[in-house]
Image (cartoon, rainbow, N blue to C red):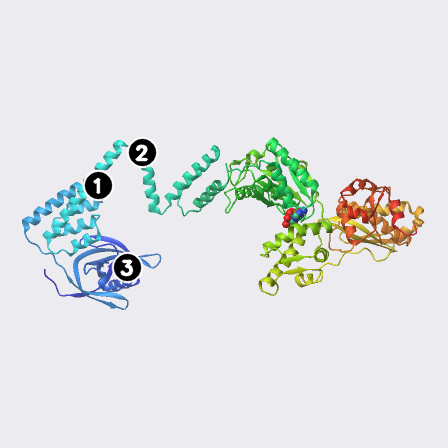
Amino acid sequence: MSRQTSEKLPMLALRGRVIFPDTTVSFDVGRLPSLAAVKRAADGDSRIFVCAQKDADITEVTPADVYLTGTVIRLKQVGRLPGNTVRLTCTGLYRAEARAIENVDGSYIAEISELRSVHGDETLEEAYFRTAKSVMGEIASGTPRLSKDAISALDSCADPDVYVNIAAHNLQIKLETKQELLDCVRVVDRLRLLDKLLNDELEIMRLERKINASVRASIDKNQREYYLREQLKAIHAELGDDVEEKDELERRIKSKGMPEEVEQKALKELSRMGKMQSSSPEYNVIRMYLDWLLDIPWTEKTVDTENLKDAVKILNDDHYGLEKIKERITEYLAVLKLTDGLNAPILCFVGPPGVGKTSVASSIARALGRKFVRMSLGGVKDESEIRGHRKTYIGSMPGRIMNGIKNAGSTNPVFLLDEIDKLSSDMRGDPASALLEVLDPAQNTTFRDRYLEVPYDLSKVLFITTANGLDGIPRPLLDRMELIELNGYTQEEKKEIAKRYLIPKKSTANGLKEGQIRFDDGSLDTIIAGYTMEAGVRNLERNIDAVCRKAAVKIAGGDEQDITVSADNVEDFLGARRYEADKALQRDEVGAATGLAWTAVGGTTLTIEVSAMHGKGDILLTGKLGDVMKESARAAISYIRSNSASYGIESSVFETTDIHIHVPEGATPKDGPSAGITMATAILSAFTHKPVKSSVAMTGEITLRGKVLPIGGLKEKALAAYRIGVKDVIIPADNKKDLEEIPENIRENINFIPVTDVDSVFKNAIIGL
Ligand code: ADP
């Protein structure tokens, strides 16, 4: 071993590679100390001492982390790459050994001396050298791994020591072994080691060939496919794709029991997905799509309750009253059972909010032992909300129908379509027609959601719909449904519902035990009249909940053991009263009459005011009246004008009088023809200066000839009249048949006066006519 005098050179630590003299290599450098070393070399004579890191994973290298034997290289090219990296091309000059390494300004400088090869027994060297060349020749002919340049460089090399360097550079061998070759000083030792490596390589190559040959021989078509798949898997694994995920999906798709068409589609999409990288957006779109197909119930089904009596009991247990409705539902369930659901009509529960439409529907599900899902149609404008968006749109999803089915998890749930009268349509398509398809037994066996693209059989689903009123329901839908009306409750009924259902339900929900809270009758009266204004019991339920919550706090805090809520202490729980009880007009007044109206929250009373003043025959209508209501005001005026003589009014008066009709609570929209006779009464009173009886309320449509036509919602209106305490209610004679529906106690307290013409209205309502 001979050493030259030492010198200092910038040092660069290499990760996972050894550079040999007599070779030209390119590699990238990015670490700051390395970049500094490169700069220092470029400023000097372009030489750098490079040595391998013992562990390639270390990022901040200390002298202890590198092999001390390395190579002095010369930089031939330094190219800039994006991101502060440079690509070096360099040639290995000679081997060297570091004696000391110091850190200067953040990069290393090594004190090195050249490591010269030592020649020994020439014959032995020559023998090894020849063997090496011949084995290498065999390897080169059998594997494409060696480049043409490498082969010709090796062929033409006559120096055994240089040969070792070039061969070591081109062989695929472990870093440690390469380092060993670099460390080795005696040429004969280097050659011996190289021979061993070459023989190993040859052996591996032969083995590979053998395997390939035998594999090829036995590969038939299936195996070939398998082999290719395995290779594909290996490629995916290399790319970081999740192959197991795909296998798992395939297994799930095949065991899901989907209809043939759907399974084919799913497998097709899966195979498309198989060709994509898991990081690509399309991959995830398909992944999500397959998840949907797998989550949707295709075969899952619940078995309907066998015994109809049990079903009826559940209906009764869940709801108070509603006798006619329960009866109808019982019939419906019986038919459903006998016909196996074929051609069962779609029920539509119509009534104001909070009367139990949703809860009756969910009871039906419970009674049948089916899953229950609910979808609100309120404000649904876009067809795709029902039918889904095509999956080509980013973020697209199935529509709400299929969403509901997925949530139900069975193919035959009870599916409630809430607020079908609140559907609206605009330029984005007509949701009503999509819904029609859903509800039509002729079409719904192959319902196609746009996202899912495959048909789904909705015919096993029991659809029930609800609506507040009939007005907004598209005609074709209306034709397909059987309407079941649920009316508002009387104060007494509300109290019963509260006692039997709402109070037990809410006290348990708030953690109160039996006997810890009691509501006396007075408290319920006060809550109903002072804190709610509704046909149903939704706000009543909310208020009871609030009381229970506060009571729970008091009891939990140890202030009290048990609590009785009474009319006197309701305010402690609910704050000040929100509504003063509606009252009938206090006095008999000229130009003011009480009408009865039906609104979304049930029946209500409205006062119609008319003033006649000097002018030129103009008519002014205020109070946010709808077109129909305005028209009936004009009809009322025309009738009175044409019959003015019989009421003792000068006909010329109308030309010099302006009429202003106002319906208070101006912000609430009002419409419908049923205020016709009320307006006529107030107008006539204003022109004749005779007062209207404050104890009378009325409802009825008026024709130009003074006939009184029937109206809807009589029960709700009667409830409202009863609430404000009027004595007489004038109704159209044609509505007499509806009186049966009105609760007993109201019929006892109110005198219903049926009329056929508006003249009788005037006689009953206007004093002194
Ligand atoms: P809707 O769907 O008509 O708006 P809900 O079904 O949501 O009304 O009813 C509101 C609440 O009132 C529910 O908690 C329901 O259980 C209760 N409820 C309504 N009617 C009755 C009734 N007849 N018996 C018992 N509870 C009732």
Indicate which disc residue 533 carries: none
Q: Position of residue 168 (x, y in %)?
A: 18, 50
Q: Earlier in the sequence, mark 3 or mark 1?
A: 3
Nearest to viewer (mark 3 / mark 1): 3
Residue type marked 3: Ile
Q: Which residue is mark 2?
A: 223
Q: Quadrant of residue 209?
A: top left
Q: Position of residue 41 (x, y in %)?
A: 24, 63
Nearest to viewer (mark 2 / mark 1): 2
Q: Which residue is mark 3?
A: 58
Q: Earlier in the sequence, mark 2 or mark 1?
A: 1
Could you tell me if residue 474 is visible in this image?
no
Q: Position of residue 225 (x, y in %)?
A: 33, 34
Indicate which disc residue 143 carries: 1
Q: Nearer the viewer, residue 249 or 374?
A: 374
Q: Is residue 1 left or right of residue 263?
A: left
Could you tell me if residue 562 is visible in this image?
yes
Question: Answer yes or no: do the residues labelled 2 and 1 have beta carbons within 8 Å?
Answer: no
564 vs 222: above or below: below
**Element type where label 1 sits in the image:** loop
Residue that appears at 54% across and 35% down: 457
